[in-house]
Amino acid sequence: MPSAKHNVITMAPLVPRFHLFEIDDQTWFPSFLRAHVQEGLHAAWVNRVPVLQPNSPARVAAQILQRILGPRLPSYTFIDFCAGSGGPTPAIERYVNRYLAAQKQPSVDFVLTDLHPNTDAWARAAAKSDHIGYEPKSVDAAAAPRELIDGYTTKGKKVFRLFNLAFHHFDDPLAKAILKNTIETSDGFAIFELQGRDLYSFLMPAILGIGCFLLAPLHAWRLRSLSALIFTYLIPILPFVLVFDGYVSALRTRTPDEVEALMQSCGVRTDGWEFKSGSEAYMPPFGYVNWIVAEKVSSRDW
């Protein structure tokens, strides 16, 4: 399996990987608080702070897909297998299709799926774009329904999976199962993370917590939610969870070499795949999009 690295920040992990628990993942964590946490992560993906950020992370992710996939970009349908409340995928869709329109190329579709579907949020995203769809039924990324995949491959499209701020949630056995299913049923995949086990990533959760305090009034006003204010200022659960889970996410995140090792040991042949990785700044010197893009070599002939 050929591999290549692009724009890599040459900093070794500070610590080994630890698969600790994140509060937002726990079944006992109230759903209304989880919705606020997910909204905070969504804001971190799609918003750009003037002067501090040249681009939003979502725009950087779109640019990576555009550059790495190149002329093959229109041949894919992009399926987000851990979409949560939508995450950056609707924003990535806008950037990618604007780019394709400027190149006079056909638009591509993006599909939202999750083990726990958030159909209300997805329906709102789909209402804003003809190129956003979603699967209302539960979808297991380790056992993607054949009818879901066939629904796009029979239309002459290849399937490209997206894991946006998601792959670090999987322990090694589950990660291997997901990679195995991905290799068996897809022609490519991308993993995008906003953290890693490096010094810069351990500074970002504190910045995220400060941002939570500063932006909570805007978030509460937009959602007409008094609870966003109560659980930010009076009982600061939301900033605590964002910071705590941010540090745990950093400890959970794998390096490209670790993901490639899982891919090679997942139980299927990978010699027909090309593996690329890199790290690109969205808020230097602290914020980076760490990315992995793997593509079936035969797909390059399309």
Image (tube, helix red, strand yellow):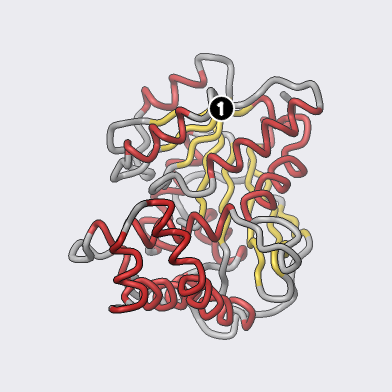
Question: Residue drawn 32% across and 36% down?
Answer: 119
- Helix, strand or loop status at disc 1: loop
How many marks are shown on the rendered structure? 1
Specify the quadrant of the image occupied by residue 107.
top right
Residue 178 position within the rendered picture, expressed as x and y whole percent measured from the top left:
42, 48
The image quarter containing residue 70 is: top right
Q: Quadrant of the C terminus?
A: top right
- Residue 254 vertical position relative to residue 13 in the rendered view, above or below: above
Left or right placement of residue 255 versus residue 83 in this view:
right
- Residue at 56 percent across and 77 percent down: it is 207
In-front residue for pair 73/124: 124
Considering depth in this image, is 246 or 41 the residue closer to the camera? 41
**Residue 9 location in percent, x, y?**
74, 72
Q: Could you say where residue 37 lies in the image, as x and y percent from the top left?
A: 38, 62
Q: What residue type is labelled 1?
A: Asp
Q: In this view, does 160 lie to the left or right of 139?
A: right
Identify the residue position indicated by label 1 in the image.
109
